[in-house]
Amino acid sequence: MTSETVQRRATGAGRLSTQDWTTRALQLLVDEGVGAVKVARLCRELGVTKGSFYWHFHDLEALKKAVADRWCAETRVALSEMASLGDLPPLERIRIMATQLVDDRSWSVERALRDWARSDEQVAATIADSEQHVFGLVQDALEQLGHDSRSARMRAGLLTYAGIGFAHGQQSLPKPTLEDIDDLVNFLSSEIEARRP
Amino acid sequence: MTSETVQRRATGAGRLSTQDWTTRALQLLVDEGVGAVKVARLCRELGVTKGSFYWHFHDLEALKKAVADRWCAETRVALSEMASLGDLPPLERIRIMATQLVDDRSWSVERALRDWARSDEQVAATIADSEQHVFGLVQDALEQLGHDSRSARMRAGLLTYAGIGFAHGQQSLPKPTLEDIDDLVNFLSSEIEARRP
DNA sequence: ACCTGAACACCGTTCAAGT
DNA sequence: ACCTGAACACCGTTCAAGT
């Protein structure tokens, strides 16, 4: 591999920035999973000794936090784009979110980060944030469609959890078609169901 | 900690069986996550040297497979119990499954195993199995309630994915109450939604 | 400010040798 | 059959010393 040197050159004068470390770490995370993000490995690929790493970060945990923060920032941009759909009719917003949820997004990053979250408070908080954000958007749309808060909460939760589940499920279940999504959106926004006492 | 010795005594004559290793490994997996399942740690807790471990297993991977196989067997029992609800009315079956999905089941085990599945074919196959099983049960129940297969598939998928998502979500989203589950079951089994052409 | 070099504790794996 | 003991490579962390 000679690409390491290229990577360093691209940075600037041969000294590394925090960005260089997080970029490489995110790459490893997505490509090979949490287990591949190691100090020794990073140093080898970036062509420096471990002492360099420990000048930039206090420990591995700190590097992870930096990576998570970066992903968090990028995610927030994507989410705010979702929010800027505010003028569209609610039904359309839900359809767009449902499509996006199923689409080939960066699920691999989210999955990896979610694994990570189980052993890292910081990452967990970041993920919880974006979860609640999506949930809130769906809930609002449903309430604007005339659902009371109880109904909106239940349906928004169902969709949000399903989205998370879709990211984590093995591909054994049938992947929803566009028709399925149409059905799903109509279903989620349909009239209050007959209450059976 | 003196419980290690107790653990060994409980086994029998002081020599360890494969069961002893997998039991302790599962415990560590659930309590402290994938990262805690290490050869050195296990040996320390079981009061043997590493050589003992490597007599029982070829490597860490083999231990993992053994743990997964055990969990797989236990899961299959739970699933077949679900299937034996066949005589109950479909609506009741769905309610039971939904409750079970949300209940404090061994989510920690499932989550850990699912992480594991990403790097282990065997574990992945096991999990795919149980996913499809649950999906099938829900779908059948919905069809017996008079839904056509398209509608049943969509709704069953929604619930199954939501169940998976619930296991993986950070606890930031509102945990469904029993009332919510009632609503949810009624919602899922409600009349075909108004089609908008 | 940014990095090297060497050191230490810890983990995974192997293997000859013990009972 | 089941385990010990010692060895080796590898990783995380620290720190004095270099530029």
Image (cartoon, coloured by chain):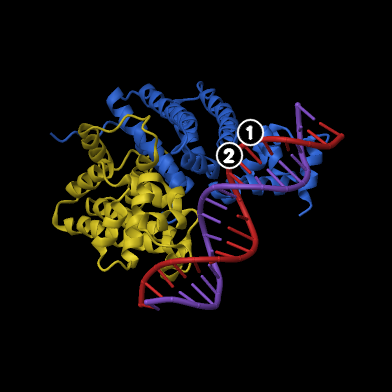
Chain colours: A yellow, B blue, C red, D purple
Residue situated in front as seen by the camera: B34 or A80: B34
Which of the two residues, A30 or A115, is positioned nearer the viewer here? A30
**Residue marked by disc 2:** B60
Q: Nearer the viewer, residue A179 or B50?
A: B50
Res B141 quadrant in image = top left
Q: Quadrant of the C terminus of chain A?
A: top left
Q: CA distance from mark 2 to mark 1?
A: 7 Å
Give percent across and percent down for residue B128.
Answer: 43, 30
In the image, A110 versus B192, the foreground residue is: A110
> Is B25 left, or right, of A53 in this rendering?
right
- Going by the numbered disc 1, the residue's amino acid type is Phe
Circle 2 — which element?
helix
Identity of the residue drawn at 25% across and 44% down: A98
Q: Are marks 2 and 1 in contact (CB under 8 Å)?
A: yes
Q: Give the residue at mark 1.
A: B57
Can the viewer see residue A38?
A: no
- Mark 1 lies on a secondary structure that is loop
Q: Chain of mark 2?
A: B
